[in-house]
Every structure is written in C-alpha cells, then in structure tokens.
Image (cartoon, grey):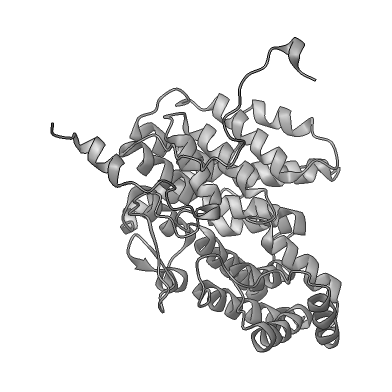
Amino acid sequence: MHQTMQEQLAAKAPAHPDYSPGLEGVIAGESAICQVDEGEAGLRYRGYAIGDLAGHSSFEEVAYLLLFGHLPTGTELEEFSDLLRRNRPLPEQVPNFVTSLRPGMHPMDVLRSGISLLGLNDPDAQDGSRAATLRKSVRLLAQIPQLIADSYQVMAGRHPAKPDTEGSFAENLLGLVAGRREGDVGAAMAQALNVSLILYAEHEFNASTFAARVTASTLTDLHGAITAAVATLKGPLHGGANEAVAAMLLEIGRPEHVEFWLRETLTQKRRVMGFGHRVLRQGDARSAIIQRHAERLSDLCGNHTWYQIAATLDRLMLEEKGLRPNLDFYTAVAYLLMGIPRELSTPLFVCSRITGWCAHVIEQQEHNRLIRPRALYTGPATKAYEPLERRA
C-alpha cells in the first residue's frame, strides 16, 4: 500500500522535533519589510541601508517607505506629510479619557488603553481591507504623539500642549514632550530625534512585531494587533532599555565614577544596560549613527557629562566583556540632552515603531496563515483517572 505524503513526512519526523528556547534562530515567516544584515549596513528597510536613510531622509519618508513599499516622490511626500499634520488632533472621546487619568499610572498602560479607544472611534474600524488598514495606520501614526504628550501632562497636573500644525513629525513630537528650542540647538535636537525615529522604526521579527503578527494572523483588526504590540513592548527586556540606560547614567552621575561603578556592577553580576543584542552579535550599526548625534548635542548644549560617562563605559565594556553598545545606549544620552522625560522613552519608541508594526500587520494579512506553533510537552506521563471518593 502506498503511503500518503503526510504519512511519509510523519515517518521521517524525529520523535522530539528541534526546540529552540525563545525561538532563537528559528525562521518563523517571510517578510519583505526589513533585512537584518550583520555586515556594514546593519539593517535595511525594503532594501535601503539604514545609514543612507538616517543620513538623508526625514522620518516621514521612511514611514511612507515602510507603509507603502517605496520611497515617496516629492508630491507624495508633501501629501503624506500634510495628511499626518491634519490628523494630529485626537477624536473628541479621547481627551475625555485623558482628563480622567490619575498620577502614577504607567504611560505604556495608558497608551495601550488609548489606542484601543482610538480604534473604537476610527471611521474605518470595521473595515479590514488593505486600503482601510493603511488609512488607519496613518491616523495612528499622526495621533499617537498627541496621546502620549497629553496623557503625560495631565498625570503631571499640567494642561496638554496643542499640536504643531506646521512642523515636521520630529519637531512636533519634540515640542510636545520636551518643549521647542530655537536656533542651532533646537535644530540639532529635532534632527537627532528624527534620526532616532528612523533607527527605531523597524527591526524584523522582534518580540512586539511578532506579537502584532500573531494577533493579525487571526484576521482581527489593526488596533487590536497594535494593542498587543504595545503590551509586549512595555516589558523591560524589550522596549524599556533606553529608559534603563538613562537611569544607569544618572546613577553613575559623573565620568570619574564610571570605572568604580562598573567594577562593582560586574562583581555583583548585575546587568549593564544598553550592551549586546539578541540578533546583532557583531555590533549594532545603528549605535554609531546615533552616537554621532549624541556627541554633537553634547557640544551644542555645553553639557558633556552624559556623553563622557557613556563613552567611558563603552570603552571599558569592550575591554572587559567584549560587548558593544546597541541603539538604546547613545539614544539615552541624546534624549537626556533633549530634556525628554525618562518615563516617555518607551512611548516614544511606539511613535516610531508604529510604522513597522502596521507594515507587518498589512503584510501578514495579505499572505495570511494562522500562526499556531506547537509545544514540547514536559508534563507528567499518562495517569489513570481516580474518582473523587478514592483520592487520598
């Protein structure tokens, strides 16, 4: 009797299939959005090297590239930027939610709930088509900075700031969370923030993106998938890293304290934040890009403390542990110099990564297969059931 293909495959399958804790190294799907390149480029968005994008593009251009699949023409960029500006104000029900917030609530919890509320109020809420999902993606990208800033101000007992109806995405975001600066310093801060947004926009199947894709594979709505991504990003092993780096720099305090602090930290086997990467084993090319902006801001602001602490720690970690900094490390320096509140570091990650998340949701649902892996069972062997009255 001839075996079916399924029977042949089953006969060849090992009794215990290969298992990789944390799915490390496992290929879990296909994507045309981002290539993690261990070479000089480090990272490519739809084929473009991250260094070229960070060096020459606005965040709006990169957002357009990720969402629509190609770099925009001048006309397309102008129309897209205008669309983002027009969609910055929040729907009427959302400010009512914001004003109900209390001090001490976690900004990421507030953001997660706020995005759900935006979903309830979106005119395309029940439309799962590609065109509608793109419209919802653009609205989310436009509205999230205002949601983050308004929530933070209300929880701090202050009045929310109005969105900038003229500036770029980075300029508006900086003004909302840290206040606008004039002159060369203000321009350098907006440029550094623009670059950081580009660098954080996408990174293949990281935990939050994979959570969004798993959720999207059920064919649920965009806001549901993005809510899952935000909940995942809240975890300190994923999105909270640059906030943790800032806390570490503040703990060290002065450049001359670095060596003693590091020696004590390594002796106590505590983790030094901002070093190493789960995928980029040979170093993170994005780190060198944001480092240049952090150094320039230090010079323009006349404040070299944070950069000197970071540079010294960078050198010592390479000497002691052979580890290089990741993107979060010098980003924390830049954000401290900009005056961005530490607790908004991870929400600002969302302002950027929302582009990658939405692109992945669209890609997943266009070529969908429900993501449903298996588990390697490690529980008890087969047991005979005993009636309640016979159990000891």
User: Does 132 sit above or below residue 351?
Assistant: above
Specify whether 155 is left or right of 195.
Answer: right
In this rendered view, identify the residue nearer to me: 158 or 343: 343
Question: Image quadrant for the C terminus?
Answer: top right
Kindly give the residue lying farthest to the left in the view shown.
1
Residue 102 location, quadrant: top right
Q: Residue at x 62, y 29 (%)?
A: 117
Specify whether 158 is left or right of 124.
Answer: right
Q: Position of residue 46 (x, y in %)?
A: 34, 59
Specify whether 331 is left or right of 212.
Answer: right
Residue 88 location, quadrant: top right
Specify whether 371 is left or right of 385.
Answer: left
Residue 112 location, quadrant: top right
Q: Position of residue 39 (x, y in %)?
A: 40, 77
Question: Image quadrant for the N terminus?
Answer: top left
Q: Residue at x 46, y 53 (%)?
A: 205
User: Does 196 sit above or below residue 6?
Assistant: below
Residue 161 appears in the figure:
no
Q: Position of residue 62 (x, y in %)?
A: 42, 58
User: How many marks can you see?
Assistant: 0
Q: Residue at x 46, y 28 (%)?
A: 220
Q: Position of residue 18 (x, y in %)?
A: 44, 53
User: Does 171 sit above or below residue 257?
Assistant: above
User: Does 155 sit above or below residue 164?
Assistant: above
Q: Residue at x 71, y 54 (%)?
A: 344
